[in-house]
Image (cartoon, helix red, strand yellow):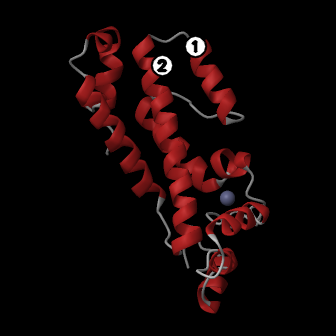
Amino acid sequence: MLTQIGKYSITSSYLALIGQQPCLRIAELVWTSMALPKHRFITWLAVEDTECCICDEKVMETTMHLLVKCEWAQAIWKEVKQWTGIELQNNGIKQTLERIMLTHWKKFKEETIAATCGAILYYIWRARSWKKFKGKIVHTNEAATQIKKEIMERLQLLNSSKKTQNCRSFVQRLLCRRPNLCYQV
Ligand SMILES: [Zn+2]
C-alpha cells in the first residue's frame, strides 16, 4: 500500500488489512452520542497526545511535528516553495512569520506570503482532521492545488487594487501569467 506521498509502507498496509486505524477508533470512542459535547471535547484534549495520523513515522502529534516536520506537511511546504519561489518554512510557524516580517518585502507581498502560510496550515489541519475523524486520506498534491487555487482567487480579486502595483511581477508569477515561471496548478 502506498502512503499519501507515494511511498510503500508496511505499517499502512498492515493497518489497511486490520481495518480502521487506531487513532480513528479512539476518536469514535470519544465522540459518541452518549458523551456530553463538553465532556467529549475535554476528553479529546486529554488524549490529544497521540501519534501523528497523516504520516507513518510513529511520532507524537506535536504542533511542530504536524505543521512543520511531518513528511506530509514538508511535501506541501516544498510544493508551495516551488510555486512562490520563496522558502517559507524553517524552524516553526512563529519563526516563519517573524522571518516574513523581517525580510522587508513590499507590504502586499508580505501579506500574500503570510496568507499563503495560513492556507498551508489550514489544509494540513484539515488533512489531519479528515484522516482522524473520517478515515479519509488527503493527497498532498490535492491539498497543494487547493492552496494555490484559493490564493490565486484572492489575488485575482485584489489584483486591480493599488497595493498590488508595487509587486506586480510577484503577483504575475503566482497567477502563472509569466510563461517561463508558470507552474502547474
Ligand atoms: Zn506526521
Q: Which mark is residue 46?
A: none
Q: At x 65% / y 66%, what residue is drawn? A: 53
151 relative to 96 in the view: left or right: left
Instruction: Identify the image quadrant of the C terminus.
Output: top left
The structure residue drawn at horizontal position 45% and vertical position 37%, both measured from the top left corner, is: 82
Disc 1 designates what residue? Answer: 103
- SS type, badge 1: loop
Depth check, mark 1 against mark 2: the one in front is 2
Residue 118 seen anywhere in this rendered image of the structure:
yes
Residue 97 % position (x, y): 61, 26
Q: Amino acid at mark 2?
A: Glu
Q: Quarter for ligand 1?
A: bottom right
Quick check: 137 left or right of 183?
right
Q: Residue at x 59, y 73 (%)?
A: 8
**Residue lying furthest bottom:** 18
Q: Quadrant of residue 52?
A: bottom right
Vertical order, 34 against 50 (above or below): below
* Residue found 24% across the figure and 22% down from its top: 159
- The answer as to whether callout 2 falls within 8 Å of ligand 1 is no
Please give the residue where the numbered disc 2 appears in the rendered image: 110
How far is mark 1 from mark 2, CA to CA?
Answer: 9 Å
The relative height of residue 73 versus residue 88 in the rendered view (above or below) is below
Secondary structure of residue under mark 2: helix
Asked whether the residues under the numbered discs 1 and 2 touch, taking CB atoms below 8 Å apart as contact, a structural biologist would say yes
